[in-house]
Amino acid sequence: MSKQLQHIWALLKKDLLLEIRQQYTFYGILLYVASTIFVLYLAMEHPESQVWNALFWMIQLFICVNAVAKSFLQESRGRMLYFYSVSGARDFLLAKLFFNAVLMMLMSLVSLLLFQLWMGSPLQHPWQFAGIVCLGGVSLSLIFTFLAAIAARVQQNAAMMAIMGFPLIIPQLLLLMRLSNTAFSDVIQLGQMKIALSLAGFDVLIVALAVVLFPFLWKD
């Protein structure tokens, strides 16, 4: 078990070093986030709470596609062969899942701050919404990391991710928007914990499927 943790930690450090060396990709994503939210501000200024909530989660979807989905697509065949020789498939995948989850949480919190700065804050419970944003960022990153791992093995990467991702991401976005609606009202709404547990269970299912299926793709 300790050897497996060492492999995961080494792979995490590798991804972190790549992000530090290739800072233009990180700042490019930040520029994309800021410019998109600013355009929304110019178009709508301070929308009502339901529109604000829907726009926020749609932006998170596009951020995830740009920030997380590239994780496997940027790995060359030579690199994959090298990782195959020094670590196992599960260690490699778990490191990617964890790194992308942290990255997406950071991007989601940055976009939340920019949303509140430019488009106002209709939130009644901002700290509750921030927690939901972290949960949603992790959930989106897990799905798109799993899809990127599958799509990296085929030639039509972008098309494959779009085809596979649509039926998975729509129910998750609906659950996130329903859960986050509770942060816009002072009225106590029932069922919050049930929705949160459903999201957590969905995340566990995605991780389990990825851990089981990815080794078969790894051998290909």
Image: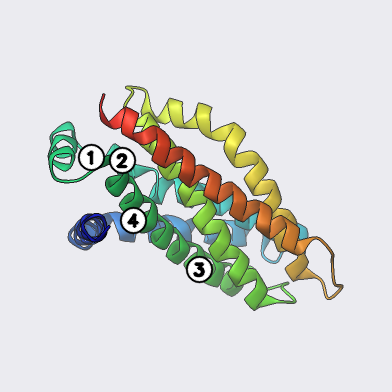
**Residue 125 located left or right of residue 202:** right
Q: Is residue 186 above or below residue 219?
A: below
Amino acid bearing label 3: Leu
Amino acid bearing label 4: Gly
Q: Quadrant of the N terminus?
A: bottom left
Q: What residue is disc 4 on?
A: 28
Q: Residues within 10 Å of mark 2 (few under 14, many from 20)?
A: many
Q: What residue is disc 3 on?
A: 109
Are the two marked residues, 2 and 1, in contact with CB atoms closer than 8 angstroms?
yes
Q: Quadrant of the C terminus?
A: top left
Which tag, 2 or 4, sits closer to the chain's start?
A: 4
Which tag, 2 or 3, sits closer to the chain's start?
A: 2
Q: Residue at x 53, y 69 (%)?
A: 114
Q: What residue is disc 2 on?
A: 72
Give residue 153's position: percent from left, percent from top.
Answer: 31, 27
Foreground of the two, 116 or 178: 178
Give residue 205's position: percent from left, percent from top.
Answer: 54, 44
Which tag, 1 or 4, sits closer to the chain's start?
A: 4
For residue 196, the mark is: none
Secondary structure under the numbered disc 2 in the rendered image: helix
Secondary structure under the numbered disc 3 in the rendered image: helix
Q: CA distance from mark 1 to mark 4?
A: 19 Å
Foreground of the two, 26 or 173: 173
| Residue 105 in view | yes
Q: What residue is disc 1 on?
A: 75
